[in-house]
Amino acid sequence: MTILNALQWGIDQLQDSKVDNPRLDAEILLAHCLHRDRVKLYVFYDKLIDREERKRYMECIERRVKREPVAYIIGYKEFRSLCFKVTQAVLIPRPETEVLVEEILKEYGEVRKKRNVIRILELGTGSGIVAVSLAKEIERLSIVATDISLEVLEVARENARVHKEDSKINFIVGRFLQPIRVSSHHFDFIVSNPPYLSQSDWKNVQPEIKEYEAPDFLFGGQDGLDFYRALMPDVSKLLNYDGWLVLEVGIGQAEKVSNMIKNTGEFKKVKLVKDLSGISRVVKAQKRMVTI
């Protein structure tokens, strides 16, 4: 079997199973099994693949036919041009989360004028993509990244080590704000991509999500807003004045989360930011200065 034969076989299998993007998925899986770049598949299209490569590739296609996500099959996912390890202990990074990182990068320059070291708290770090991406971009940075699972944090720590940013990030186990002592921590940014799927969202998600990704990290209660409600009473106490709260939100949630933030009376400049699909994906707000 040549590379081209194998590729076409994989495409046909995925098409027959109604998998989205069958060509792309087949290319990624074959390139992974052959340890080649995707573009090289077409350069060496007539090269024969050996028995072990063929077996490995067929197993990968079989897993994808069963709707297992490509990232779990190959064990990694790209985010902001960086490669991150993923396991079934963590959610798969989504491109829309890049907006979360970009909005912090837009604001940190002004914060830098007041602080020698920028301090960031990330709630629910998952595989560590946000924390590591920020550490790559910002010098003189200290990040505290929390998650409820030790298994999840092991993946995040490994990603930080691989990208040589582990010295900037302190990973702490705990649920949201619980492991953070208000009296001893103040941050310039608090950032989170929390669980925000509602009950109705959950009924309609793709089988790749419903059957393989952990619901505890996706489901945000009946309306998807439980995390945001739990966060509002205390989050401003952990922010420096003029610090920023930056939150990813689900489709149709931006206005509701924005109103929650405004109702605390602690923030100014509440802004909604759209992703590349035109969906309001991030809500960010700056803490008010105290006036005497």
Image (tube, rainbow, N blue to C red):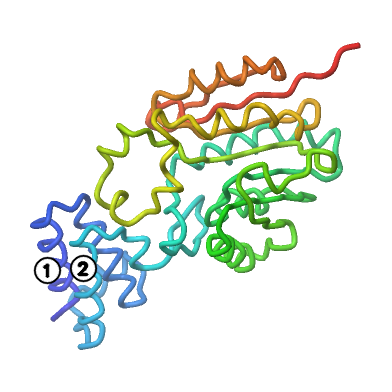
Closer to the camera: disc 1 or disc 2?
A: 2
Q: Counting other residues with Cα less than 10 Å from the Cα at mark 2, is it few (<14), some (14-19), or many (20 or more)? A: many
What SS does tag 2 mark?
A: helix
The residue sitting at 40% across, 23% down in the picture is 252
Whole-angstrom CA distance, mark 1 to mark 2, is: 9 Å
The residue sitting at 21% across, 82% down in the picture is 55
Location of the N terminus (image quadrant)? bottom left
Q: Earlier in the sequence, mark 1 or mark 2?
A: 1
Residue 141 appears left or right of 128:
right
Give the percent coordinates (x, y) of residue 192.
58, 40
Labels 1 and 2 touching (C-beta < 8 A): yes
Give the percent coordinates (x, y) of residue 274.
47, 27
Give the percent coordinates (x, y) of residue 40.
31, 70
Residue 62 appears left or right of 283:
left
Residue wearing tag 2? 61
The residue sitting at 70% across, 48% down in the picture is 179
Residue wearing tag 1? 9
- Three-letter residue code for mark 2: Ile
The outermost residue toward the top is 292
Give the percent coordinates (x, y) of residue 10.
16, 66
Of residues 41 and 249, the one drawn nearer to the viewer in this rendering:
249
The residue sitting at 36% across, 68% down in the picture is 74
Total numbered circles:
2
Which quarter of the picture shows residue 61?
bottom left
- Three-letter residue code for mark 1: Trp
The outermost residue toward the bottom is 51
The outermost residue toward the right is 292
Residue 128 appears left or right of 3:
right
